[in-house]
């Protein structure tokens, strides 16, 4: 018989699972990036690691997103976590046996990326299925996004400090356990029916009567956040460890400040969401993040200590808002496909932007790399808003023509 779990308990368990999964995935990735940065001394070597993670998801996510809409989503999430635990445990065993670090790092992270190609759409679909819509879903998305981003940033703190103190192998063993914890949390939500309807929820962005946001604009707005996070995580260790010649502990401390910025973003979003639409919060947040990113590579460690949490604060609110817009617009029967497209498109762009930023950084400086990434984020945000304005004008044109035709007919009478 299906087990009925209260919605609040379900939401808490899903958030805990999201946090531990994000922590596990990124501890593996950050540890590999730190080891490669020490050995290779170039951002391109680190960049290829992130490309090895992005490429399989970019290719497979749009197709596996459709699969996530057809299969049982809770079972998919649990299966992804269990496979990830086995893969994560394989890397420390490989290193302990004397295997080549570079080969093991690339292989393990590539395998985790294959799992992530179906995990991202399956997790989004499960959330849409189990969490009530409206304001409840909006609040949940804020907490879920903050848990995910906090897990990603805390992974750098844990990875940087633990690698420096204990070494890579004990950390990677701990990392495998995080996936098992996530699987237990999702198992505990029980089997129950969907709480949402099959019709997409209306997305009000500029007052009543306005047409819903076009899906392409929402996907672009949400996906560019994935590009920014991934490339930034590859650029920051190169800047701190190589250009500034600081230790992994310094890198971890800076990302810890970023985690505090993300946590503050969750509280800030609650205040701003009462007065502003998600579209406005997302647009302003991504614009501000782009400007702060340009300055982050110019002021050394002191500048990073101030600007990274500020950037995390505005980026976090923009990320929550863009996720809310996309999930509210998506149909329950197709939410896996929508998030699969967003994940795949974002990571495909990540490959291109990563190569560009790595080339600029290795031939000039990390400051130029930060500026290049900020320019990409700014351009993506502008394009998403332009697409939205164009769709609004197209949707309003027939209505204006219909009103004018009725006026002409009345005049003839």
Image (tube, rainbow, N blue to C red):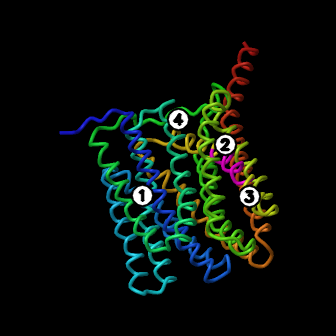
Q: Which class describes the residues within 10 Å of circle 2: few (<14), some (14-19), or many (20+)?
A: many
- Asked if disc 3 and disc 4 are in contact, CB closer than 8 Å, the reply is no
Is 315 one of the magenta-colored residues? yes
Q: Which residue is mark 3?
A: 304
Q: Is residue 180 above or below residue 99?
A: above
Residue in the foreground of this view, choosing between 53 and 296: 296
Which element type, helix, strand or loop, lies under badge 1? helix
Q: Which residue is mark 2?
A: 282
User: Can you tell which of label 3 and label 2 is closer to the viewer?
Assistant: 3
Residue drawn at x 42%, y 33% is: 132
Q: Is residue 303 above or below residue 403?
A: below
Residue 77 in sight from this viewpoint: no
Range of residues picked out in magenta: 307-316
Mark 4 or mark 1: name the one nearer the start of the chain: 1
Residue drawn at x 58%, y 50% is: 219
In the rendering, at what x and y percent does residue 391 appear?
A: 67, 41
Residue in the foreground of this view, choosing between 182 and 213: 182
Mark 3 or mark 2: name the one nearer the start of the chain: 2
For the residues labelled 2 and 1, the Cα–Cα distance comes to 25 Å
In the rendering, at what x and y percent does residue 350 appear?
A: 62, 65
């Amino acid at each position: 018989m299906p087990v009925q779990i209260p919605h609040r308990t379900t939401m808490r368990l899903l958030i805990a699972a999201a946090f531990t999964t994000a922590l596990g995935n990124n501890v593996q990735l950050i540890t590999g990036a730190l080891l490669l940065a020490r050995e290779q001394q170039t951002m391109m070597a680190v960049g290829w690691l992130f490309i090895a993670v992005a490429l399989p998801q970019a290719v497979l996510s749009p197709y596996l997103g459709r699969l996530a809409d057809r299969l049982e989503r809770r079972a998919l999430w649990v299966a992804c976590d269990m496979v990830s635990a086995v893969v994560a445990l394989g890397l420390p065993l490989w290193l302990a046996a004397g295997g080549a670090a570079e080969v093991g790092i690339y292989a393990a992270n590539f395998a985790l990326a294959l799992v992530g190609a179906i995990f991202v759409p399956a997790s989004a679909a499960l959330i849409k299925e189990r969490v009530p819509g409206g304001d409840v879903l909006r609040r949940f998305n804020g907490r879920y996004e903050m848990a995910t981003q906090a897990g990603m940033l805390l992974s750098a703190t844990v990875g940087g400090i633990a690698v420096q103190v204990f070494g890579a192998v004990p950390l990677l063993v701990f990392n495998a356990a995080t996936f098992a914890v996530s699987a237990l949390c999702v198992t505990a939500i029980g089997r129950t029916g969907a709480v949402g309807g099959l019709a997409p929820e209306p997305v009000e962005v500029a007052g009543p009567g306005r047409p819903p946001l076009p899906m392409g604009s929402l996907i672009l707005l949400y996906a560019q956040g994935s590009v920014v996070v991934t490339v930034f995580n590859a650029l920051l260790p190169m800047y701190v460890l190589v250009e500034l010649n600081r230790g992994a502990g310094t890198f971890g401390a800076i990302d810890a400040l970023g985690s505090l910025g993300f946590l503050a973003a969750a509280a800030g979003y609650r205040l701003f969401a009462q007065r502003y639409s998600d579209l406005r919060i997302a647009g302003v947040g991504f614009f501000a993040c782009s400007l702060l990113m340009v300055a982050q590579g110019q002021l050394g460690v002191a500048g990073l200590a101030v600007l990274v949490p500020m950037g995390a604060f505005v980026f976090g609110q923009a990320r929550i808002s863009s996720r809310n817009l996309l999930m509210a617009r998506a149909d329950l029967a197709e939410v896996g496909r929508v998030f699969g497209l967003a994940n795949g498109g974002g990571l495909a762009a990540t490959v291109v932007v990563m190569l560009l930023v790595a080339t600029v950084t290795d031939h000039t400086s990390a400051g130029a790399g930060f500026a290049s990434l900020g320019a990409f984020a700014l351009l993506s945000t502008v394009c998403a808003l332009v697409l939205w304005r164009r769709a609004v004008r197209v949707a309003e044109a027939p209505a204006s023509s219909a009103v004018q035709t009725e006026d002409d007919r009345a005049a003839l009478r």
